Image (cartoon, grey):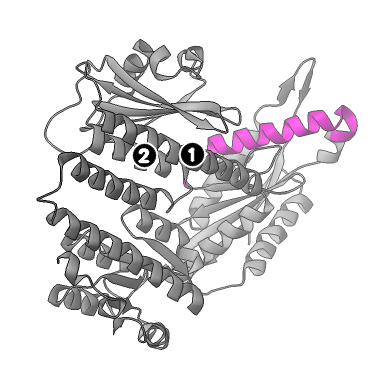
Amino acid sequence: MNAGSFKTASNYRVLVVDDEKRLCDLLTASLQKKYQVQSCYSAEQAISEIDRQPFDVVVTDLKLPGKSGLDILNFVKGRDERVEVIIITGYASLDSAVSAVNFGAASYLVKPVSLPNFVAQIDRAVAHRDFYLKSAALMQESVGMSVDVKQHLSNVTDIYEFSRKLVTTLEVPEVMRIIMAELNEKMQPTLSTIGVSLFGLADIYVMPHIGNAHHDAIKEILLSKWEQAFPVLNRNDLLKQNMSVSIFDGKEVPGTMDPNALFVSAVPMMISGKIFGSIAMFHAERREFTEGELQFLHIISSMAAPLVENSYIHMRARFLAENDALTGVGNHRSFHEVLSREIARANRHKGVFTLMMIDIDDFKKVNDTFGHLVGDAVLRDLTARVLATIRQQDVLARYGGEEFAVILPDTDVKGANVLAERVRSAIAERPYIFPENEIPYTVSIGLSVYNGKIPQEKAAVIKEADDALYVSKGEGKNRVTTR
């Protein structure tokens, strides 16, 4: 394509894929006045069409019979990584849709799909595709341009692509990964790092340019050049393990990271004139950045800083919205969201899971005897013991007051009873100890096993577990009952 042969909107090709024929046809019809649109009702048919002819934008449902929307995403990106892919998903598969964005999807839509929102997403995707094609065409015609102009045009394109990647997510790890991957690609350091101090949290993120790196080796490198790399962070926090260090893998190419990354180049990250962190690159050899590279680095820092701050604000807000302020585990709202997703998953796969309800026996006596501050400490003690007993995939939430719920994925009645007995025993085997007092306490537990082959409403599942809990209470407490 040359500058004189740019596409018009009507020449852009869009493929819509959904096994719900009515929805697929509706989405296709909403675009036909503006673009060349084709529809498919299966992943296999879509892959065949993509193999036969190029598309600029592909819209696909995540859940399809046979191959999935992720298979379509991977196939499209394998042929042309610049094709825009939009994922359509149901609420129960929202986590998978977010993962798809991390694998290259431009965005996602949640069913039921709003037509105005859908058309707006397509328009945006076409605009991004158009920008890329025009930039590529201009680069091909850059024979007569000076080196500086060519480099500037390349930087403009890189910054545009970088900004697009950043705005696809507010998840802190993904924001950091995108920034460091861009730095590694553009600046070729031994490793890129980002140090942040925000809202009482101090974190460092690291990505080698090549391969992976051991935590101890990274820690030694960071400490060796701490003042140059992280002037706003406290070195002792890392030494005392009060600071998290997240390490991402670099490019999967032959070779290993050079451990002698002793030369550092760093720029601050600032919001409203206040430094809250830094971007630092470690090199095995001393080097001076060109003026263009320094300019690019400062632009990247300026663009990244507000997005990093926003991602931390989002993380903090979500934690407060989803977690109980006293115990730190999921709250009543997040419990219902997780339970809804688990019911949908069990129904889809005809699987099972178990809901465990836990209630502290005679908790009112603890509050009346020792006061509410000690009662709160007992609740935190219970939380710690349960978390230490259940599996990593299990979800603990505070249901209300002294009642807690645990969702046990892929767990039948036999497995649930074994785990519930472990929880009961972990509480009963020793008292909670605080200065000058010991408080022995026990819990009653009720279990409800959900079978996806016989779907139930969420309220019925909770009622069964609650009924079983009150049977445990009525039969003497400190016991497990299954309904």
In the displayed structure, 14 sits above or below 293; it is below
Residue 323: give its label. Answer: none
Quadrant of the frame with the C terminus: bottom right
Left or right: residue 185 versus residue 241 is: left
User: Magenta span has 368?
Assistant: yes
Q: Which one is nearer the viewer's eye here, 215 or 34?
A: 34
Left or right: residue 254 versus residue 134 is: left
Where residue 457 appears, as percent x and y from the top left, is 61, 72
Seen at 66% across and 69% down, the residue is 460
Q: Which residue is denoted by mark 1 in the rendering?
A: 308
Q: Which stretch is magenta?
A: 367-393
Q: Which one is nearer the viewer's eye here, 192 or 306?
A: 306
Q: Which one is nearer the viewer's eye here, 402 or 196?
A: 196
Amino acid carrying label 1: it is Val
In the displayed structure, 394 sits above or below 69; it is above
Quadrant of the frame with the N terminus: bottom left
| Residue 127 figure quarter | bottom left
Say if residue 163 shows up in the picture: yes
Q: Which residue is denoted by mark 2 in the rendering?
A: 179
Where residue 393 appears, as percent x and y from the top left, is 47, 47
User: Magenta span has 265?
Assistant: no
Say if residue 351 shows up in the picture: no
Task: Label the magenta part by its dominant secondary structure.
Answer: helix
